[in-house]
Image (cartoon, helix red, strand yellow):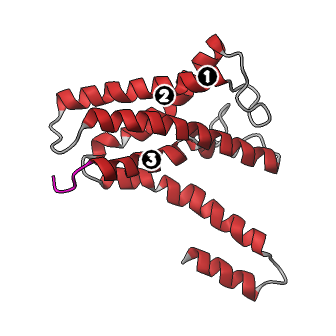
Amino acid sequence: VFMVVLLIYTVLYHNHTNALEGMTGFFGFFYACFLLSHIYLVREYTYGKLLVWLAFIAAFGCDTGAYFAGITFGKHKLIPTLSPKKTIEGSIGGIVTATVLALLYGWWLQRSFTMDGVNILLLCGLTGFFGSFLAQIGDLAASAMKRLTGIKDFGKLIPGHGGVLDRFDSVILTAPAVYYIMLFLIDVQV
């Protein structure tokens, strides 16, 4: 519906706008609203109140692991034109850290809760691995958007960290990954 409204606006006000502005508006809506809405979808799904944390464990675990692995072992630049400080070693360290943290969380869940019809370690391992990979893609994509627009941060809400979107650019892709992995691995008849 939102896209149809943008298209109608583009047609009716074609002298004042253009298709690129409409596409940019749709992308902004899809990027921020639709992708982040998966946090809510995860939370409302079977066992979601316990599994919603996987989106944050994968994203923030990856960010933290990549930072420390990059500082300790980083020698080879990942994509210097987008993010000059990120290294291949940091990227691998982020994936390993997030996967290990997600598996530890899965181990704790398995010991603490009964989750019928769920291979919790498989679910946590997959979300940790794929979520951390996608967290890095989300972070680099946000860097590409900032480079294109010539801005350093998406906002100034959090001193030293930028805006809310700067903190959640990795969660934007991790939350959908958690949701769709849950769809495939959780028996909804539980």
Q: Position of residue 176 (x, y in %)?
A: 45, 51
Residue 188 drawn in magenta: yes
Amino acid type assigned to the residue bearing label 1 in the image: Gly
Q: Residue furthest top?
A: 72
Distance between the alpha carbons at the discs numbered 1 and 3: 21 Å
**Mark number for residue 61?**
2
Q: Residue furthest bottom?
A: 12
Q: Main secondary structure of the magenta part?
A: loop
**Residue that label 3 marks:** 177
- Compared across the picture, whether 119 is left or right of 36 comes to left
**Residue that label 1 marks:** 90
User: What range of the chain is rendered magenta?
Assistant: 186-190
Q: Is residue 125 visible?
A: yes
Residue 50 drawn in magenta: no
- Res 140 quadrant in image: top right
Residue found 43% across the figure and 54% down from its top: 38
Q: Earlier in the sequence, mark 1 or mark 2?
A: 2
Q: Residues within 10 Å of mark 2 (few under 14, many from 20)?
A: many
- Res 5 quadrant in image: bottom right
Task: Please determine whether, in this image, residue 55 is positioned above or below residue 60.
Answer: below
- Compared across the picture, whether 126 is left or right of 142 comes to left
Q: Position of residue 3 (x, y in %)?
A: 60, 75
Nearest-to-viewer mark from 3 and 2: 3
- Compared across the picture, whether 115 is left or right of 18 comes to left
Say if mark 1 contacts mark 2, CB within 8 Å.
no
